[in-house]
Image (cartoon, helix red, strand yellow):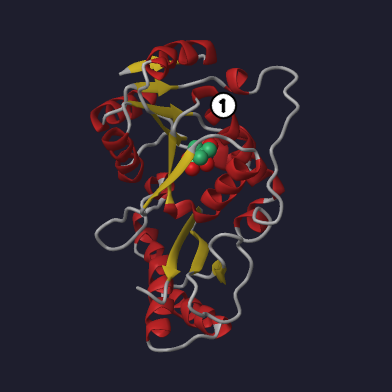
Amino acid sequence: MKTIRTVPDLRAALNGPRRAGRSIGLVPTMGALHEGHLSLIRRARAQCDQVVVTLFVNPTQFNDHQDLAAYPRDEARDAALAAEAGADVLFVPSPAEVYPRGFATTVTVDEISAPLEGAQRGPAHFAGVATVVTKLLNMAQPDVAFFGQKDAQQVAVIRRAVRDLDIPVRIEVGETIREPDGLALSSRNVRLPAADRHRALALRRGLDAVRACHAAGERDATILAAIGRAAMAELAVEPEYLELVDPDTFTEIHSVGDEPVLVAVAARVGDVRLIDNDILDAGR
Ligand code: PAF
């Protein structure tokens, strides 16, 4: 695996394979790789001839300076894991490479970006994500780009930006990878003190309670959300939000019908902010 730090070097490395008709898969990450990222890299490896993993802690998507400063960074560890999972190229640009002096362009995706994560983290969050992902797609020009379902709203924002801006890439979404007890893997989990680790299961408990209540026949979204919140309260965790929304538009759902519904939850457990989600699907 080659580590590359500049856009011209990345383009040079990918030109040959692209001209030879080899497919390129891109796995954008902010590092602190865990099994969730590795499953995406393996999936890219299985489908694509060249696998590029990007490692860039994007400052513009952080609303909280402390969160940015505390974000775990260990390039040597990430490089070893990415190589083992099958990456051919690790692209590690500096902030100045991504945002050169005078950088003045932002991609904003209206409406989908506003509720839930957008409301909690502020409008700059998804603008930062959409801008950096658009740039990474333009830099690598992959055939396929891989993202995780845990960040469901991020996926919806990226899909919409790709569609609206006619970016020629297929977006693939990998399922959320979990610890054996159900906690969704996240780079932030390492910051959970032992005393809070058990309480972090509240998110999954809330989602499970909504799923069970839906399976028992409840269709009213307000009641389903209240059941989820009550299950979380048993672990003394209050969600920032627990809502039922349309998985493509992120508009609120009042009653669950035949169409799939996303149940999205976010909560602070101690100092650590966690998110998770589930899909209620009449067919499942
Ligand atoms: O999901 C992430 O790790 C980031 O939001 C992404 C997609 C790499 C953009 O910085």
Above-or-below relation of 103 to 221: above
| Image coords of residue 271 (percent x, y) | 51, 53
Quarter occupied by residue 38: top left
| Image coords of residue 173 (percent x, y) | 41, 49
Above-or-below relation of 231 to 169: below
Q: Is residue 131 left or right of residue 48?
A: right
Label 1 CB-ligand 1 distance < 8 A: no
Image point (39%, 67%), residue name: 204
Quarter occupied by residue 34: top left
> How many numbered callouts?
1
Image point (47%, 16%), residue name: 10
Q: Residues within 10 Å of mark 1 (few under 14, many from 20)?
A: some
- Residue type at mark 1 is Asn
User: Looking at the figure, which quarter contains the N terminus?
Assistant: top left
User: Looking at the figure, which quarter contains the C terminus?
Assistant: bottom left
| Image coords of residue 241 (percent x, y) | 58, 67
Q: Is residue 273 left or right of residue 98?
A: left
State the residue in front, 187 or 222: 222
| Image coords of residue 211 (percent x, y) | 40, 77
On the image, numbered disc 1 is attached to which residue? 138
Image point (43%, 47%), residue name: 188
**Helix, strand, or loop for circle 1?**
helix
- Residue 61 in sight in this render: no
Above-or-below relation of 26 to 225: above
- Residue 183 in sight in this render: yes
